[in-house]
Image: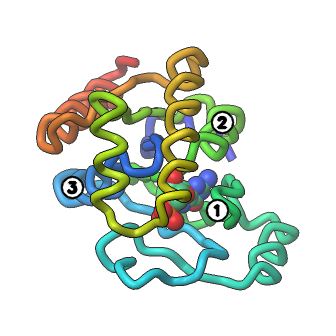
Amino acid sequence: MAVSSSSCGLLIVLVGPSGVGKSTISRALAQQLNVWYTVSVTTRTLRPNDEKGKAYDHVTKEEFFRRLDDDQYLEYAQVYGDYYATPKHPALDHLQAGQDVLLEIDFQGAMQVRFHYPQALLIFIVPPDEGTLLQRLNDRARDSAEEIQKRFRAAKREIHMAKGSHAFDHIVINDNLQHAVEEIEKIIRHKHAGGI
Ligand code: 5GP
């Protein structure tokens, strides 16, 4: 489906490494703007502090792949051993109805969106510096030391690729939540006004 006509909503994609603050930024944006925030499907099992992060539709691997075979996803990826996907229809229906749609996904999923929906607004969020990211990964007190190192290495790789790829329309530094949210709001308003 084409999502480029002026009556369509804007497909806004927030991307960034684990621990950069995407969920917090997405929630703040969803409260302040008239955007529809997608609920992703995942094979990841529930975590104790999940209610503080992004809400998911948790499914088995069998169900995940049944839906994939049924062409139900707008994009999907395997991230840290689990599968994640954005359900296609709710997102496209909202876009067609003129509603902006906000996705919070990983780098691989963003590349699929860029390919299939070139008019989407892709924003990559980076930490102010590597030390801050490592601190944030540690502060979440969620992962083992080995898992934190894995995510930290992956984050450095992703940031490097994002800066070199030209696939993203904007790179926003999350040094301060309010500033990052205000900057993204400005980018969205500018895009609605016909800018890049
Ligand atoms: P977590 O399980 O920690 O909430 O998320 C792990 C990673 O999966 C994060 O980078 C998050 O952005 C990404 N992710 C969450 N939902 C989706 C989705 O629907 N599609 C893709 N491609 N990645 C997702």
Residue 2: x %, y % from top left: 65, 41
Q: Amino acid at mark 2?
A: Met
Residue 119: x %, y % from top left: 55, 30
Q: Is the residue at mark 2 in contact range of ligand 1, meaning its CB lies under 8 Å from it?
A: no
- Quadrant position of residue 130: top left
Judging depth in this view, the residue of 129 and 46 nearest the camera is 129
* CA separation in Å, label 2 and label 1: 13 Å
Residue 167: x %, y % from top left: 58, 23
Query: Does 33 sit above or below residue 61?
Result: above
Residue 127: x %, y % from top left: 32, 34
**Which residue carries the number 1 mark?**
85
Q: Quadrant of ligand 1?
A: bottom right
- Report the residue that reaches farthest toward the front: 145
In terms of secondary structure, where does tag 2 sit?
helix
Q: Amino acid at mark 1?
A: Ala
Left or right, 43 with respect to 138, comes to right
Mark 1 Cα within 10 Å, few/some/many (few <14, many 20+)? many
Q: Which mark is residue 111?
A: 2
Mark 2 or mark 1: whose residue is earlier in sequence:
1
Judging depth in this view, the residue of 102 and 153 nearest the camera is 153
**Which residue carries the number 3 mark?**
28
Mark 3 or mark 2: whose residue is earlier in sequence:
3
Residue at x-position 48% and y-position 54%? 148
* CA separation in Å, label 3 and label 2: 24 Å
- Quadrant position of residue 196: top left
